[in-house]
Amino acid sequence: MKRSAALLGLVLLLAAGGVFAFYHLTYPDIRTWDEGTNVDVVASSLEARSFPALVDWQGPFFEKPPLWWYLASTSVAVGGYNAFSLRFPAALAGFVLILLVGLAGRRYYALPGAAAAVLFLLACGHLFIFKPDGIFSTHHVRSADGDVVQIAFMFGAFLAFGRFADGARSGLYAGALLTGLAVLTKGPLGFLPAVVFLIFQTISPRRVVIGRRPAAGAALLLVAVVAPWHIYMLSRFGRGFFDEYFMHAIVHRATDTLEEHAAPWFYYLQLLTGRKLCCSVELVALACVAPFFNRRRLAAYPAAAPLLSIGILMAVISSMATKLAWYVLPLYPYAAVLVGGLFDSCWSLVWDRSRSLRSRMIPSVAALLMIGVVGLCAARNLRDIVFLQRGWMQRFFERSIARCGDELVYADAQLPGDLRYLLRRYRVPRGEPGASRCFIRWLDADPTPSSERACSRVDKAGHLALWECAGLER
């Protein structure tokens, strides 16, 4: 009976993961900053047919590896240039990540531990909410960014290497392949699962011997995934690509502060104390400490690898000069695995008939508190997603098009990424103020029509205003 209830709970949580990832995915609009830049690269690259290179509206785009843009371009080719298609790769990766955490929990623990791991992941609002608790964090499962795609590949590699640790040789090659895809999605952090696996193989008494031939094959597979695009870009663009991609986006980001994103070394520890980001840093800390009381468990991959992943990740991002809140996102699935392990330990003690009723009370209370706290955080995140509203810019453009039809133009020099997206999405051309019956400009801009016709402001929203001019036939 309890097994059936746990299985049902796990299935319901995985189904809820679909809601967390896909429901209201188009709400609100594509955001400015990185999301606007990313979707511009997708559109510009498709229009220029520049693949395998990427371009934006200004020219070649060198900041990141290309895999997320390839996936988003494929999604756009199938579903059209809209927010759902552009956000679909990250949302799908987020849903797959939830499934993988459930799979990890089921592989390493009993069903209740797997359910607890999934529930904890859903409780981490940082993964699903735009600017949680007012923190500047814009990359998540529901945004047009590559972070969660990389995290899903990384966690898949972590599981694959775990399969090898259990004796399945194919896990070594699958881990190498997924590691390469993670690197090709968003850079060197994708090497983390391979680094953790190598450290585990070096220090753990429960390591599995890797033969020279399988090790060489896995290394060659990893190089075969990562190297071709980098070699192509270096051969085609030379020093320009090297300086922007390697020196600026990687080296400079680590050694200097980009775009004034500076913070003290303990910045990420502060972030994790936010209830709307991590839900319970105390629970994560307990889950990290618990394996140290069981040396046999600590030496095994299911505990050692997540602990190494969290430790290395925190050391790397805390030592970087540029600090952005979403750099800590890869921590959450590994923390979920450890939380699942902690709950599994409590659950085992609760149902251990050899123990007295009194000695089972403490783990019972602990298990109930864990589920209560994490469940409330997950429910809050679900509420926030369900009650998302359409963005003001999207509604403003739709009202403007309904009023002016194809006589609408955009007439301003300022053109951030979110506006470039909407102009493409609604096929609104650029034009001079007054040259068409209606034009959109920033609210504080002088309309200065090029003709003698009188123009008046008929609508406004946020920083945008709609102007309509007299004297032109419809």
Image (spheres, rainbow, N blue to C red):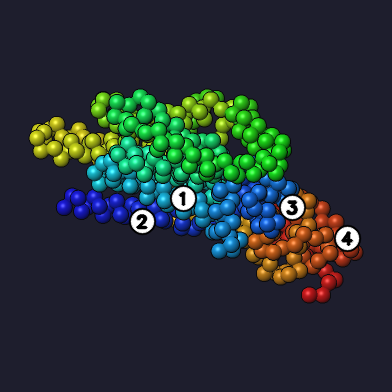
Identify which residue is drawn at 41% across, 56% down: 18
Between discs 4 and 3, the one toward the N terminus: 3
Relative to residue 128, is residue 49 depicted above or below?
below
Question: Label 1 vs label 4: CA separation?
Answer: 49 Å
* Residue under pointer 3: 442
* Residue under pointer 2: 15
Q: Position of residue 61 (x, y in %)?
A: 68, 45
Between discs 2 and 4, the one toward the N terminus: 2
For the residues carrying marks 3 and 1, which lies nearer the camera in this image?
A: 1
Question: Label 2 vs label 3: CA separation?
Answer: 43 Å
Q: Position of residue 20 (x, y in %)?
A: 43, 52
Q: Residue furthest front?
A: 213
Badge 2 vs badge 3, beta-carbon distance below 8 Å: no
Q: Amino acid at mark 1?
A: Ala
Question: Label 4 vs label 3: CA separation?
Answer: 17 Å
Query: Residue 77 sits in which quadrant?
Result: bottom right
